Each structure stands twice: as C-alpha cells, then as structure tokens.
Image (tube, rainbow, N blue to C red):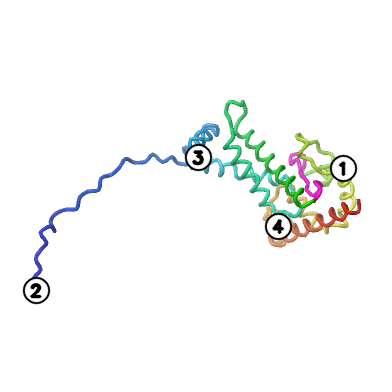
C-alpha cells in the first residue's frame, strides 16, 4: 500500500521568535563591587545580590558565633541567630551613616546573638551566667592561662560581651576539675578557641563523634552545676 506525501510535509515549521536575552548578573559581578553597592542592589529587589552577601558573610557569622557558648543550646542555633542579624544588616544599612557595611553587619550580628541569648535565658528562667561569651583575640593559644582566667582578666570592648558574674566565675574556676573530666575540659577549651570538631578530633586523636559527645556532656554538666549552684544561693 502506497502512502501519499502530506501536502504540507515540505513546509518547514515556523521559526520561534527569540526574545531579548536577559542580562542575568553573575556572582563574579558582585564580587567586583563594593559591599555597599551590592546592598543597594538588594534594596532594589535583586535577590541574587542578597544571596551573594549572605554566602559571603556566612563564615564571618560562624566565627562570631563561636565566641558565644550557650549551655543547653546547639552551636547552629547561635549561627542561625547570627544569620538573622546579617539579614537585618542588609535590610537596614544606610550608606549615609558613615560606616562600612562590614562594620554595620558585625554590630547587627553580635546584637542579634546577644538578644537571642538573653531572650532564651528569660524564657527558661536560667540566669545570665548560663552562657559564657569570649573576646576571642584575648585567648592566646600559647598562653598557659585557663579559659576562665582569660574571661576574668579580659577586657571586653562592649560590656554586653561579658555577661557572667565574677562570683560564679570563681566558683566554676575552683570546681571545674570536679565538674568536667580531663577530656571534656580539653574539648571545651578547644571549641571555644574556635577549632572545628575535626580539628579537635585530630589534635586529641579521637573520632569526631567522640568530640561531639564530649561537648554535649560538657553542656549538660555545666547546666546542671549552674542550676544547682543558683538554687543553693
């Protein structure tokens, strides 16, 4: 049976009209700009510019978050609060205030973390001495001073950065050997010195899971000690 060619078979399909190419910015474009200019694009609704700044400052937020140790909370909770502070910095930055975006972002990140910690302690009825905030540059890894010595002797640039009672510090300082094991003390000091779980594990010859478990025990033990100490007072 013969098939006849369709009369339209030789006709070519109509060409699709190409619209104008969208000028989509690349992340490298933002990298070549000053942060203040990228923020201006964010204010104009550029979501990629906002994503760029959030990614650029993510490690900075993590670094700031490591300066705070909230008993009973996960480190990622503090990081998340820092990211909220970064978002607020992008939203509220005003270039006419004569400060760089980085300086303004650091202020917003720190303020958000401290506010979140204060709110959490009020909600849980835990005294403010349930968290230790360190001024990281004061902790010299070559120093033989203990973590608590540094906290006691260090001078914070912002009074809110050191919220823990002198009496409670002295109490913990004298009881730390009884409250924490040797491994737990090493893990706590290394963690607050800004080392990652992997770095601590490598230095101590332990598995990462062992480091995580030790830090969780530290949080539980210090929380219990501070609560019991508060009740006795």
Residue 131 among magenta residues: yes
Residue at image mark 2 = 1
Which secondary structure lies at badge 3?
helix
Q: Nearer the viewer, mark 4 or mark 1?
A: 1
Q: Earlier in the sequence, mark 4 or mark 1?
A: 1
**First to last magenta residue range:** 126-140
Label 3 close to label 2 by CB (< 8 Å): no
Residue closer to the observer: 64 or 115:
115
**In the depicted structure, whether residue 15 falls above or below residue 137:** below
Which secondary structure lies at badge 2?
loop
Residue at image mark 3 = 49
- Could you tell me how far apart the alpha carbons at marks 4 and 1 are, in whole angstroms? 32 Å
Label 4 close to label 1 by CB (< 8 Å): no
Q: Earlier in the sequence, mark 2 or mark 1?
A: 2
Which secondary structure lies at badge 4?
helix
Residue 1 among magenta residues: no
Q: Nearer the viewer, mark 2 or mark 4?
A: 2
**In the depicted structure, whether residue 161 falls above or below residue 124:** above
């Amino acid at each position: 049976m013969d098939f006849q060619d369709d009369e339209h078979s030789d006709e070519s399909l109509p060409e699709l009209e190409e619209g104008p190419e969208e000028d989509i910015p690349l992340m490298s474009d933002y990298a070549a700009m000053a942060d203040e200019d990228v923020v201006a694009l964010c204010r104009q609704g550029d979501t990629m510019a906002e994503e760029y700044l959030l990614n650029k400052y993510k490690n900075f937020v993590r670094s700031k978050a490591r300066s705070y140790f909230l008993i009973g909370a996960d480190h990622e909770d503090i990081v998340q609060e820092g990211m909220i502070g970064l978002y607020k910095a992008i939203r509220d930055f005003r270039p006419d205030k004569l400060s760089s975006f980085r300086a303004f972002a650091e202020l917003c990140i720190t303020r958000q973390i401290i506010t979140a910690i204060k709110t959490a302690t009020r909600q849980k009825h835990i005294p403010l001495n349930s968290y230790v905030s360190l001024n990281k540059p004061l902790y010299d890894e070559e120093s033989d001073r203990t973590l608590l010595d540094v906290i006691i002797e260090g001078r914070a640039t912002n009074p809110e950065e050191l919220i823990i009672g002198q009496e409670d510090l002295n109490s913990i300082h004298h009881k730390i050997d009884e409250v924490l094991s040797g491994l737990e003390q090493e893990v706590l000091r290394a963690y607050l010195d800004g080392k990652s779980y992997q770095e601590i594990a490598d230095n101590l010859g332990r598995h990462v899971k062992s480091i995580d478990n030790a830090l969780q025990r530290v949080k539980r033990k210090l929380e219990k000690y501070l609560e019991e100490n508060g009740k006795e007072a």
